[in-house]
Each structure stands twice: as C-alpha cells, then as structure tokens.
Image: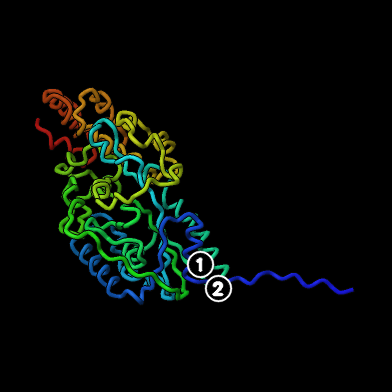
Amino acid sequence: MTPAPAASSAPIPPVTADAVRAEARALGFDAVGLARPDAVPALLAHAGTALDRFLAQGHHGGMAWMAERADQRRHPQALWPEMRTAVMVGLNYGPAVDPMILRDHPTKGAVSVYARGKDYHDVLKKRLKRLARWLHERSGQPVKVFVDTAPVMEKPLAEAAGIGWRGKHTNLVSRDLGNWLFLGALFTPLALDADAPERDHCGSCRRCLDACPTNAFVAPYQLDARRCISYLAIEHKGPIPHALRPALGNRIYGCDDCLAVCPWNKFAECATEAQFFARAELGAPDLADLALLDDADFRALFSGSPIKRTGRARFVRNVLIAIANSGDAGLMGLVEGLLDDAEPAVRGAAVWAVAQLAPADRVRALKARRADRETDPDVIAEWAHLPD
C-alpha cells in the first residue's frame, strides 16, 4: 500500500510593499503608504527644523512632553535605530454634515468631529496591531506600532509616504480624503519599496489661515499652539486668557474651522464606518445639559471617548465659556450654581460667565458676597478682574 503523502502547508509568500498595502486595505484603512527615512532626508530635516523653531519660540505652550523627547521626534531612527521602513496608514473620519453650521446655534456645544465617537487611539491601534501581527508572522522581524502616543512625527512621515501633504494649517491634507484622516504608523526593520512623497498643493490659498478665530497662525505652516482653540480647550490646564475667550464661541472641545474650510474637502467622503465615529448626543449637545454634569455623569457620558481624558473640570470650564458667549441670560441661574463648584477651574469660568450674562448690579452684588471667601488664586484673580 502506498503511503499517503505528508501534509504540507503552502509556502508563505515573501513580504512586499504591495502585500503590505493590500493587507492594510483589507483591514479597513482608507489610506496607506510606505516611507523610507533614508530616501527623504531633506523632508525629515525640514520637519526637524520646523520642530526646533516651534519649541524655541515657546509655541508648544504647556506641552512640555514635546520638548522632553524632541531628539527622538526629529528622526524615526533616533527612536528605533533598526527601523528601515515606516508603514503609514490613515482612517477617514469625514463628517456627514459641515461642522461649521454649529456657529449659528450658540446654545449648542461644538465638539470637534474627531472626538464625536470612540477614541481614535483605540480604533487605530487595534487595527495596526493586526497589521503588525500579520507582518511579523510573515517576516519574523520585530515591529513597532504608534498612534499619537510616542515621539513620532506622523504628518511628515505620512507626507513622505505619499498619503498627503502638510497644509498651511500644519495638518495633513489628502487629495482623496481632504482633511479628515486619523494617522497611525508601523515601523519595521524591513527595507520595503517606498511610495513617492506627496507635494504641496496649497498654492496661494490661505482659507485655513484666515478662518482661525484666534489668529493662531503666525505665518503659513507655523502655528502658535498657545492661541489655538484646540490647545486651549484640550491641553491647557489653567484659565483660558480673557482676550481669547470670546473667540471660542460655542467650541467646547477642539476646533475644526481651519480643516472645514479647506477647498480639498470637495473630495472628502463621509466616513463609511460612521457607527465607529459618530455619537448623536455629541453632534449638537445642549450647553445647559453639559454644564450640569457631575464627575460620575461626565465619565459615563464620555466613556470610550477622547474627551474623557480631559477631565470634567476643564470640560465644564469650556462649557461655561461657551454659555457666556451665547448671551443667553436665561442660563444665569445655572451659572450661579457653579460658583460653588468644588473645582477652581469651574468656579473661575463661572465668574467670567456671570460677568457676561448678568446685569452690572447683580455682578457687583455677587462679587461683594463671594470674592473675599475665595481661596484659589486663579479664581481670586477672576473676581479681581471684575469692577467693584
């Protein structure tokens, strides 16, 4: 009797750039490109110079972590010397409705489009880890995955990988998907064929610069984060400067203005996985409802959302500034109640909101009764800013 042939598995095909791109697409990424840092030294050097200027001018504000690991941030091989190829991926989060329409609804809170659903860090990292596992199994080589949580300059690498270019607003712009892309990176020691870098297609357009409510762009391609609403509402821990508060309008978490006005959005598409990103309650929430959130309510509402990391105190601070900017005196009772909040950031914002909404005699009466009882220096400064 002839023995049966031994079972054999099909050979694993070699890892190629085309295979990586195909697998990334199969995993649901909307954009993918490969960059070899050794092939684009001038592009990365320019990005490093821009980073040095940004830090030297103090434009990073309170984001000390940017300066602490700047040496690693300048070049990917400073972070991992064995790295030879960066696989850059993008996930579309294009909104179904123009986010700018909320400017006409001052008692509604404007949440940046990217934060209206699940935390993009979790969404991208889960898929990137699947891509990393696939690549490791076929190559036997180590891989590293990054989603905005390490000193990696994703935007210059995405530009080098041909996914898009950095617009004058310093964000990535794609010819196919406009301004709405989450970015992630996978580093590998494999020397794979790279894509051609994308070139700048902004031309003479400056719509993004002119749209900024706080004039945060000191020049094309140069952002002073200390004036950026996204920085002020999300990263900035102290009181928001008085001069910038009116410009926040009803923006309570981030700002999409410079992204939303870009002409390249004519090619953008609504995210095909809207259920991944969209939460109806964050599309146009009532400011009054948000101001009343206690810590437990805040954590429950924003479970799984990037907003949760900001914390209730900073978030309600932003909501109170938006309420002040709404001009709706009917919200005064709610604002006065928050003058007794346990968080100084909330009390301080409530002081400013009272000053914008209440009659002058009411403001003076509240100051006379409360200012001397305050113990927090920032809140004391808010009361001192008001007339006696």
Percent across and percent down for residue 318 are 27, 39
Q: Toward which corner of the image does residue 380 lie, by quadrant? A: top left
Report whether residue 234 is seen: yes
Return the residue nearer the eye: 286 or 92.
92
Quadrant location, the N terminus: bottom right
Q: Which mark is residue 124?
A: none
Above/below status of 230 relative to 198: above
Q: Residues within 10 Å of mark 2 (few under 14, many from 20)?
A: few
Q: Toward which corner of the image does residue 337 lie, by quadrant? A: top left
Return the residue nearer the eye: 331 or 264.
264
Tell me if label 1 and label 2 are in contact, CB under 8 Å. Answer: yes
Percent across and percent down for residue 24 are 48, 60
* Residue at x 35%, y 53% (from the top left corner): 177
* Residue at x 38%, y 73% (from the top left corner): 36
Report whether residue 321 is seen: no
Q: Toward which corner of the image does residue 53 lie, by quadrant? A: bottom left
Badge 2 element: loop
The amino acid type found where label 2 is placed reads: Pro
Say which residue label 2 marks: 14
Above/below status of 5 relative to 182: below
Above/below status of 72 relative to 248: below
Percent across and percent down for residue 257 are 24, 46
* Residue at x 14%, y 43% (from the top left corner): 243
Is 173 left or right of 82, judged from the image as shown? left
Percent across and percent down for residue 291 are 31, 32
Return the residue nearer the eye: 232 or 50.
50
* Residue at x 45%, y 51% (from the top left corner): 122
Say which residue label 1 marks: 19
Query: Label 1, label 2: how many angstroms apart (C-alpha)?
Result: 9 Å
Return the residue nearer the eye: 348 or 8.
8
